[in-house]
Image (cartoon, grey):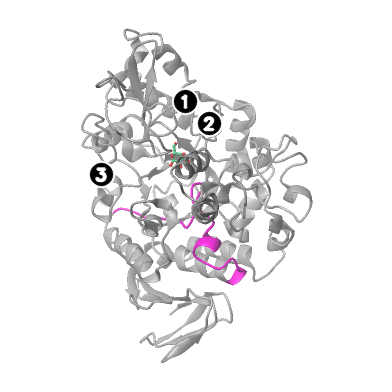
Amino acid sequence: MTPYSPDPDWWKSATGYQIYPRSFACSNGDGIGDIPGIIGKLDYLADLGIGFIWLSPVFSSPQADNGYDISDYQDIAPEFGTLADMDRLILEAKARGIGIVMDLVVNHSSDEHHWFRSALQGREVPYRDFYIWRDPVNGGAPNDQQSYFGGSAWEYDRASGQFYLHLFDKKQPDLNWQNPSLRRAIYQMMNWWLDRGIAGFRMDVIDLIGKDPDAQIFADAPDLHPFLREMHEATLKGRNVVTVGEAWSATPAGALLYSGRDAGELSMVFQFEHVSQQWDPVIGKWAPKPFDLVALKRVFNRWQAATAQDGWNSLFWGNHDLPRAVSKYGDGSEDSAKMLAIVLHLMKGTPYIYQGEEIGMTNAAFSAITQFRDVETVNFYAIRTAKGMDPQAFIQGANENGRDNARTPMQWTSGTQAGFTTGTPWIEVNPNHTAINAKAAQSKPDGVFATYKSLAHLRKSHPIIVAGTYTPLLEYHPKVVAYLRKHQGQCLAVIANFTGDPVTFDPNLTLQGDSLIATHTARTALNGPLTLAPHEAFAILG
Ligand code: GLC
């Protein structure tokens, strides 16, 4: 299904693809990816079989957080192109049956947005209340709330003698969703984009908009769902679009509040339980925990169960904030990349591919802080090393979990700068592009690209992948992922060796059928004990 079919559930059988525009394809040699660059790669994406692109922000922005700091929601940053380029992208994608999902970053704006500039003019100006201002307490910040990017979440404005809230960088002041005029302005802007023909929105840190800063409740605050329902009524209702909310706080118990069929809010959320269960509970992602497959499966299984009758899941291994899947969950090898794709895409939900994942791109291996570009990494390096952390230990953590891993340029060819730009890229190209690149990947009949392509096409022709029930198997096996999908008398068994060692076990399952997909040799039957090669994965449809 495509976004342009009348089916209101088109996004259930579609595969999403995230583009981080800065690092995707540069058309003009300035070292920064751009919209014409994306247009030039639409045939590649159509070949892969995706249904929609989630486009990370391309709006006007001083780029303090690579576009997640927007200074004009209704214009395009010059380094990415023009509004005319954007309209052309929407049309050219549509011609290939691909929808464009824009990134809605409305928890905060840039401090260079005209709303904030006006707000700085004094306590009495109308836009003042579009942001969150508080008086000092005992001469200091109103409370000890910390920013997600390090340091206090309150910034002092000397001219007015008040602090403003910024849960991210100080160049990302939080918008005050309690103000009805602000909400109306956002809904108007959303409708303006929807009327231009986009296929929906990915909503940045949307679980924070209901915040009650005085009670220090930020995520999942009481006003969150009323605001989302109001937004739906004002913008999305009656439109055949997809919406996915980024919600780090989402739990299986709360999932249906967002995506239940009567919720009147969103199509689905991105939840992050499978990501954060591998971080140190106190120090967070800079101190990764050893990988635990049983814990990972428990998270997936809980989410599958929570959305079994109602609601919908998004399925993803990576994005622009996370390490590369094949490095985090695999061992960097092609076989592990293919296994990860099969395990994820055959669960129930809409799968998302993060650019480069479909060719097996790996983490960066930076050795000095000067190679990093990400505001979060750079800030925390300063904070943690000032507190005595060994700089090399920090860099090791950043190489495992830092956000720049996913932001190195897309590897198109084995040539200069991986074919990403004719100039100097804004962040270094991974030297392994000589071996890992789209051109090589596309020419391998059984490679990573072919696997992703098969999966994207299979979900369009096999309703069992979209609608089948999900039953986990071997939940406590430390090396194997296995589950069953069932639909209208059919049964799909998905079995994978998550490790780099051979594994022998008994799935306790008898099934005869056809091979749907396989990393190694095709398998058509299950009966008794089984030995899998390292990272072998397969699916049998019986
Ligand atoms: C989201 C984005 C991330 C950004 C942050 C603030 O988590 O994915 O890249 O830094 O929100 O907008």
In magenta stretch: residue 459: no
The residue range painted magenta reads 311-335
Residue 422 in sight from this viewpoint: yes
Left or right placement of residue 149 versus residue 423 in this view: left
Q: Front-most of 97 and 343?
A: 343
Of the four image quadrants, the one with ligand 1 is: top left
Q: Amino acid at mark 2?
A: Ala
Instruction: Give residue 110's mark.
Output: 1
How far apart are the two marked residues, 1 and 3, measured between alpha carbons? Answer: 31 Å
The picture quadrant where one finds residue 233 is: top left
Q: Which residue, given by chain and number where applicable, does mark 3 sit on?
A: 263
The answer to whether the residues at label 2 and label 1 have Cβ atoms under 8 Å apart is yes
Residue occupying the point 25% across, 50% down: 254
Compared with 282, 238 (above or below) is above
Q: Amino acid at mark 1?
A: Ser
Q: Which residue, given by chain and number where applicable, does mark 2 sit on?
A: 64
Compared with 267, 189 (above or below) is above
